Image (cartoon, helix red, strand yellow):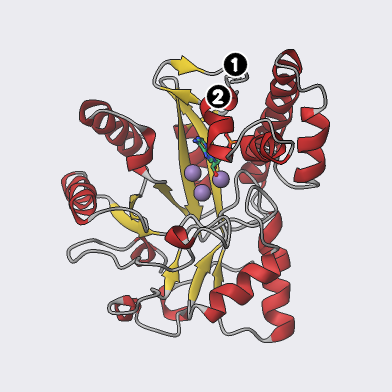
Amino acid sequence: MALLSTTDFPLTIEKCDGFSHGRIDLHSHTHCSDGSLSPQTLIDRAVNYQIDVLAITDHDTLAGIDIAQRYINEQNVPITLISGIEISTAWQGFEIHIVGHNFDKDNVHLQQLITEQQQAREQRAITIGEKLKQCGFPNAYEDAKKLAGEGSITRAHFAKVLFQQGHVSTMQKAFDKYLGKKGRNTQKAYVKPNWCSIEQAIEAIHSAGGSAVMAHPIRYDLSAKWLRRLIVHFKECSGDGLEIVLPQMNPQQRQTMLNYCLEYDLHASTGSDFHHPNNKWSDLGRNLTLPDGAKPVWALWS
Ligand code: AMP
Ligand code: MN
Ligand code: MN
Ligand code: MN
């Protein structure tokens, strides 16, 4: 796929302002990882929500992008699709997500990294399955694998299995009781993943000609001191920007994130992190306007 430049956009992105559903959304998931919609249905929904520019950013896979682009071409859908990915990385015992945008999907370096990440996912899933077996759920791995199909297997699949089988009352409880990690506290079926480093993820995205932003910095449960350390490290690894706008962030959080961008000369990205249509608070394009003074990440795409 050819790389996009800013001149390819049919609109001035500043026009996002004032829309109840913004017109650019650079973070979304399909059933190729832990989202629930097919790439085609996601595209239909984005068009209904008047989104002009969408990035599909599935966890450690590019599988949804070609399917969505083919559908756009065949149906002549009025939307610009940006190549995207959300790469899981390990840093100081934390799992940090790096989102890549607007890269060459066929780049060998990026594909090699994705192959390794998929192996790490599969290995971790097997071990999670063994731990859940010890908790009294003998077929969790097989059931999660069935749910994931050919897509990336994630902890969200295990959470859904435990929920559907009535072992927990919500998916969140599956994380709280079995799959999650809070601070240094790990739950019964938590398995330390073998993800790549932040530096490796950024390198692979850059070698494919894309830009790399740190996903949802506010969601890592880090103290201000540790968040700053993370941002400094990200910058040292040549990261390009921070995702400073997510639907559920309040104005104070947006301002804090903008200040980090200004202080460390980082660009800003915006995205809903859409997974499921029943969660209206993180629906596609919702409340995604970048604050004044932010340098948008798409300014890098020329
Ligand atoms: P994984 O990348 O396999 O570790 O799966 C994590 C995914 O599970 C995230 O991308 C979220 O979409 C989802 N998730 C839902 N609730 C939680 C939670 N409490 N902690 C971590 N992940 C969660
Ligand atoms: Mn997810
Ligand atoms: Mn994420
Ligand atoms: Mn995401």
Residue at mark 2: C-beta within 8 A of ligand 1: no
Name the residue type under label 1. Lys
Is residue 267 found left or right of 209 in the rendered image? left
Name the residue type under label 2. Lys
- The residue depicted at 80 percent of the width and 47 percent of the height is 150
Q: Which residue is mark 1?
A: 188
Q: Position of residue 238 (x, y in %)?
A: 36, 41
- The residue depicted at 67 percent of the width and 46 percent of the height is 108
- The residue depicted at 73 percent of the width and 30 percent of the height is 122
Q: Position of residue 265 (x, y in %)?
A: 22, 49
Task: Report the Cα–Cα distance between label 2 and label 1.
Answer: 7 Å
The vertical placement of 210 against 90, above or below, is below
Q: Identify which residue, 301 or 65, lies in the foreground.
A: 65
- The residue depicted at 62 percent of the width and 32 percent of the height is 168
Quarter of the figure with residue 285: bottom left
The vertical placement of 172 against 56, above or below, is above
Quarter of the figure with residue 60: top right
Instruction: Check whether the beta carbons of the residues at disc 2 and disc 1 lie within 8 A of each other.
Output: yes
Any mark on residue 61, and which? none
Q: Which residue is mark 2?
A: 177
Q: Tag 2, which secondary structure? A: helix
Going from N to C along the chain, the mark reached first, 2 or 1, is: 2
Q: Tag 1, which secondary structure? A: loop
